[in-house]
Image (cartoon, helix red, strand yellow):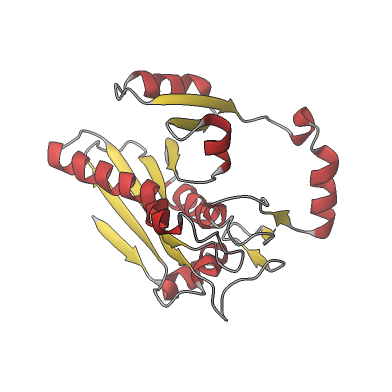
Amino acid sequence: EVEVLDEEELTRLGMRALLAVGQGSESPSKVVVMRWQGGGDQAPFAIVGKGVVFDTGGISIKPAQGMEEMTMDMGGAGVVAGVMRTLALRGARANVVGLVGLVENMPDGRAQRPGDIVRSMKGDTIEVINTDAEGRLVLADVLWYAQDRFQPAAVVNLATLTGAIIVALVASIVLAIALNWHRFTNLTESVNSGTMGSLLPIFNTASEVGYGAVISSLAAFGTIKDAVLGV
């Protein structure tokens, strides 16, 4: 089953963070929901993909060199679509839902600006510092929608999220951030792709990494800031 949510429906749902990214484009933003129901009544496994079909960086525009490669910023969404097709072709005995947020990040008179504050579907307010950190805005809404609507047993998010990973780990290494290390290890051991990966932890509280004061000051202002650097 494939369901396409258009901008009117996304507005009704309150996906303002996702819509803000695409508001400078002539191409309408969409969320596509793909469902494979082969596992009976069990809770589904959710796969969420970032689908920025072209990323100029928006008002915080990228350098011209290499921008022709920014069609690849929908890589996460492409993987999700491929996985869902493969599950259907093999008749997998599993319940899986794939969700992709499809937007184009363009500079325009209507585009979001640094300093704008948008409200996510969850209800958080987010201050936009750099419009090239758009991926997390798209995923904030799609991940919340996936959790709220489908109540999945687990979620995997696939995204070309930040160029800083290439700086830290070089382009041939995949970075993973996992809430459940044991489940992540089981997943990676079941995949024999030869891909090199690096795993980072998620801390339970901001105070564990010294961010408590920063988070408190942002909470007082009523916003979550996006990162200064991003894709």
Whether residue 51 appears in this view of the structure is: no
* Image position of 16 (left or right of 68): right
Q: Residue at 52% x, 37% y: name it.
A: 166
Q: Residue at 51% x, 46% y: name it.
A: 161
Whether residue 129 appears in this view of the structure is: yes
Task: Give the quarter of the image for residue 122.
Answer: bottom right
Instruction: Using the image, determine if residue 184 lies above or below residue 52.
Output: above
Task: Give the quarter of the image for residue 116.
Answer: bottom right
Q: Residue at 23% x, 55% y: name it.
A: 1
Total numbered labels placed on residues in the image: 0
Instruction: Using the image, determine if residue 8 lies above or below residue 95.
Output: below
Front one among 75 and 46: 75
* Image position of 30 (left or right of 222): left
Front one among 216 and 73: 73
Instruction: Using the image, determine if residue 230 lies above or below residue 115.
Output: above
Percent position of residue 197, x then y:
45, 25
Front one among 73 and 38: 73
Percent position of residue 94, x then y:
26, 35
Q: Residue at 32% x, 22% y: name it.
A: 194
* Image position of 87 (left or right of 142): left
Looking at the image, which residue sits at the far bottom? 109
Task: Give the quarter of the image for residue 120.
Answer: bottom right
Percent position of residue 157, x then y:
45, 41
Percent position of residue 179, x then y:
55, 30
